[in-house]
Image (tube, grey):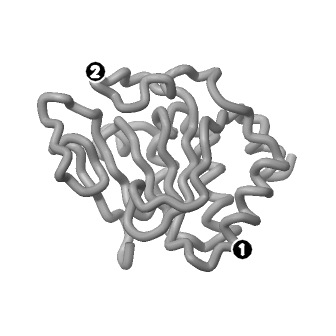
Amino acid sequence: MGDIDNLVSQQLRVLNIYPETISDGLGIRYAIYLAGCLHHCPGCHNPDSWRPDGGSLLTEEMFNQIVTEIQTNPRLDGITLSGGDPLFRPEGVSLLLKLLKKQTGMSVWCYTGYTYEEMVQSTALKACLPYIDVLVDGRFDRELFNPSLAFRGSSNQRIIHLHKNS
């Protein structure tokens, strides 16, 4: 089975795609929102994304369209994965990240309710880290909500640059 067939078999579900956004990381980004979240943070701005059966299944055609849109847009500074929690299905997301990096060469931001420390303790979550340039980690905490924070909702969430030049 090839990488794309393997990716499709992972049953990732895409809630939404924003071909150009400036709110999901530094610069102009191609944002992919994935379905499913176990954190259920009170005050979440996107509770409809918690459902693992939301959105549309990621197909080979959809993946190829995403790659084409990224490759043909010279304005893009990178890709962002959000959701839900994109790491709801970490094995599938690890492969998605690997293929996106390989086929586009773009920087990747990833938003997750998991902390970096939780990720490195989990084999499945840790496998995603080599393909993420900037990790925005931690559950949203409405008691720590601060609308003036750049690219995050609450002050407990961190923006972690995982690789040099990210």
Q: Quadrant of residue 9?
A: top right
The kind of residue tagged 1 is Thr
Q: Which image quadrant for residue 162?
A: bottom left
Give the left or right position of residue 22, taking residue 141 as reference. Answer: right
Q: Is residue 87 left or right of residue 53?
A: left
Q: Residues within 10 Å of mark 1 (few under 14, many from 20)?
A: few
Label 1 secondary element: loop
Q: Which residue is denoted by mark 2 in the rendering? A: 42
Q: Residue at x 84, y 51 (%)?
A: 2
Give the distance between the C-alpha atoms of the residues marked 1 and 2, in whole angstroms: 39 Å
Q: Amino acid at mark 2?
A: Pro
Q: Where residue 78 appears, x then y in whole percent?
A: 52, 67
Q: Which mark is residue 72?
A: 1
Question: Residue at coordinates 35% horizontally, 37% vertically from top-left?
Answer: 114
Dot 2, crowdedness within 10 Å: few (<14), some or many (≥20)?
few
Left/right placement of residue 15 relative to residue 67 reads left
* Between discs 1 and 2, the one toward the N terminus: 2
Q: In the depicted view, which residue is nearer to us: 70 or 1?
A: 70
Q: Secondary structure at mark 2?
A: loop
Residue at the limit of the structure toward the left, as seen here: 143
